Image (cartoon, rainbow, N blue to C red):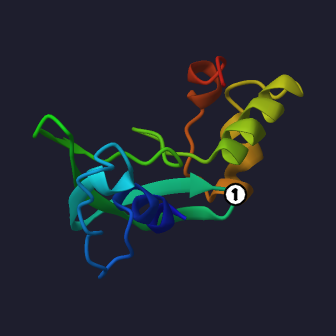
Amino acid sequence: MIESELEAALVRPRYGRRPKADPENADGPSAISGYRHGHRSRSLIGTFGRVEIAVPRARLDSAEGKTTEWKSSALRAYQRRTKHADSLIAGAYLAGTNTRRVRRALSAVFGGAISKSLPSRKRGIR
């Protein structure tokens, strides 16, 4: 999913060439160009446990001649848990489980990867 999001931003597949520059249409998708430069490893905790994913990296060229780092809209910055995992934690807390027992209550789901203080910090779940 993240790879296809980057392909859409770069307007070409992974090993594809940049589209030809069209002087008449400088505002179109051909004006966006950039370069891939590897992957970085991210760790996510979900209802499936902890998983390591490789997130692609790229630099996008702007019309002003500057470059910016590409950021995925599917994977937020500093995101460590999936939205479903956050909703499970909030649901356990709202169902009456106190913060000391959350770790035992959700250890089977998350494999013990959450702390007992997590619901206190996640009360403002969006």
Residue 7 picture location, percent across and down: 41, 65
Q: Is residue 25 left or right of residue 53?
A: left
Question: Along the horizontal axis of the image, is 91 left or right of 119?
Answer: right
Quadrant for the C terminus in the image: top right
Residue 18 in view in this figure: yes
Q: Residue at x 49, y 44 (%)?
A: 73
* Residue at horizontal 61 percent and vertical 48 percent from the top: 82
The residue identified by callout 1 is 47
Q: Hey, which residue is sitting farthest left in the picture?
A: 65
User: Identity of the amino acid at label 1?
Assistant: Thr
- 63 to the left or right of 50: left
Q: Residue 42: percent from the left, percent from the top?
A: 38, 57
Q: Is residue 41 above or below residue 116?
A: below
Packing grade of label 1 (10 A; few <14, some 14-19, many >=20) is some
Residue drawn at 21 percent across, 41 percent down:
62
Question: In this rendering, is residue 102 above or below 51?
Answer: above
Count of marks placed on residues: 1
Q: Give residue 40's position: percent from left, percent from top.
A: 28, 61
Q: Quadrant of the N terminus?
A: bottom right
Query: Secondary structure beneath disc 1?
Result: loop
- Most foreground residue, 36 or 48: 36
- Most extreme residue toward the front is 24
Left or right for 72, reference 116:
left
Up/down of 21 relative to 115, above or below:
below
